[in-house]
Amino acid sequence: MFKINERITWVGKIDWELKKFHGEEYSTNRGSSYNSYLIQDEKTALIDTVWQPFGKEFVDNLKKTVDLKKIDYVIANHAEVDHSGGLPELLKIIPDVPVYCTSNGIKSLKGHYHRDWNFVTVKTGDTLDLGKGKLIFIEAPMLHWPDSMFEYYTEDKILFSNDAFGQHYASEFMYNDLVDQAELWQEALKYYANILTPFSPLVTKKINEVIGFNVPVDMICPAHGVIWRNNPLQIATQYLTWADDYQEHQVTILYDTMWNATKKMAEAIAAGVISNDPTLSVKLFNVSKSDHNDVITEVFKSKLVIAGSSTINRGILSDMASLIETMKGLRFKNKKAAGFGSYGWSGESPKLMTQKLKDCGFDVMEEGLGVLWNPDDEALKACRSFGVKLAKKLSPSI
Ligand code: FEO
C-alpha cells in the first residue's frame, strides 16, 4: 500500500518472483506488479484487483485501508485474471457493489468466473461522479483485449490505462523517475514488442483520440509496473513511435542448429552483413538457447531478419518453429527477411524457412541459402556473399 496523493492509494501486489506470464509465453525476468488503485473521494472507487493467487492477500490488505462496505464502485478495466483475480474474494464480502466494465468485459468476466455480479456497462464518454472529481471512461478495444478500457479521473488529472503503458517490472520505487531508466525502457519496449505489436494501428488511433480530448495528464497509472508521473506523456509519445513500424539500423540473425553447421552459416552471414555496413547493429541468437521474448524485442527493432535452421525430418527444428509461430502472430510490418539452413540428406529447411518468413508477413529479399553438410571454406564464402548481398539491398548507398 502506498499513497499516491491524499485521495488515491495503490493497493496492488508486487510479484517479485514471477518469471513467466501468460502461462509460459512471456518471460518476466524482473517480476511484475498487479496495480490496483483505490480512490477515496466523496464516493469510493476501486480500480482493478490482482492476479488470482493473491486474491485473498489483496482483500486482507485492502481491509486495512478501507472498510470494504464503503466501496461504492468497482471498476474492472480488463477481465484477464491478472487484474480481475481478486474479484471473487472481494465480491464474496460486498456482493452487491456495482462492477463497471465494457460490454465485452461482462462477457469475459462471466466466462472466467461464472458469477452474475452487479455489472454496469460503460462506453466511451460515460462518466461516474465521485464527488470532487469524476471518472470518464474510454473504451480501448484490442489494447490489448476486446474488453480493455481506460478512465480519466478529472480531480487529479490521472489516466488509468490498465495494460497499456505497463511493464513487467517489479520495483519498490513504483514511479518512473525513481527507477533505473535502462531497465524501465527495456521492459516497456519488451512489453510493447511482445504484446502490442499486432495492434499498432489501434494504438496510434487510441492515443491520438486521448490526446484529442485536450485534457491535462499529470500521471498515467498502468496496471503493471511503475506509474508514469515524471513527464507522463513521454510513454504515449514513445508508443506512437513504436506503433509506426518502428525500426533501428539493426539486423537480427536467428538460427537453430543440430551440429553447428547452421551456426557457422549464421556467423559467416553476419560477417558479410557487417563488412558491407559497419554502422549496422548485427545481433545473432541461437533461438534454442535464447529467451524468445528478448529475441522478439530484437526482431521488433530490426530492418532485416535472417533466420535459419537445420533440416530435420523434412522440416525445421522445433525451437525455430516455435519462434516462427510467435512472429507470425505478432504480424510485424515493413521488415525484410531471408532464410537459410544446412542439411545432410533431404534438405528442405532453406525453402521452408523462406516460406515461413513469407507467412510471417516479412518481405523476403532472396531465396533461402542452403549448405550441404558442414560448410567448407567455399560454402562459408557463399554465406558471407549472401550476407553482403542482403546488406547491400538494405543499405544500397554504402
Ligand atoms: Fe495484464 Fe491483459 O492483462
Image (tube, rainbow, N blue to C red):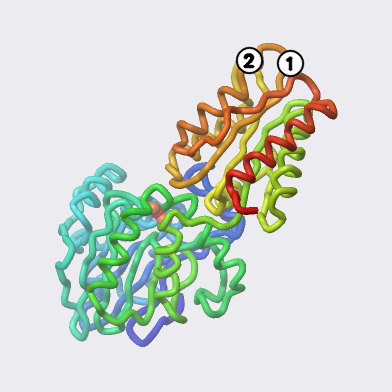
Q: Is residue 347 above or below residue 215?
A: above
According to the picture, the residue beneath numbered tag 2 turns out to be 313
Label 2 SS: loop
- In depth, the one of 319 and 40 nearer the eye is 319
Foreground pick, 390 / 36: 390
Which residue in the rendered view is the most extreme toward the right?
377
Q: How many marks?
A: 2
How far across and down, in percent of the image, does residue 156 sit? 30, 83
Instruction: Kindly identify which numbered label has been placed on residue 344.
Output: 1
Residue sitting at 60 percent across and 47 percent down?
295
Q: Give the foreground label among 2 and 1.
A: 1
Viewer can see residue 55:
no
Task: Say left or right for 181 vs 327.
Answer: right
Q: Are marks 2 and 1 in contact (CB under 8 Å)?
A: no
Amino acid on which the number 2 mark rests in the picture: Asn
Q: Is residue 293 positioned above or below 189 on the image? A: above
Residue at point 60%, 60% (across, down): 30
Amino acid bearing label 1:
Gly
User: Ligand 1 shows up in which quadrant of the image?
Assistant: bottom left
Which tag, 2 or 1, sits closer to the chain's start?
A: 2
Among the 4 quarters of the image, the one containing residue 180: bottom right
Q: Nearer the viewer, residue 356 or 76?
A: 356
Horizontal side, residue 294 vs residue 334: left or right = right
- Element carrying mark 1: loop
Q: Dot 2: few (<14), some (14–19), or many (≥20) neighbours within 10 Å?
A: few
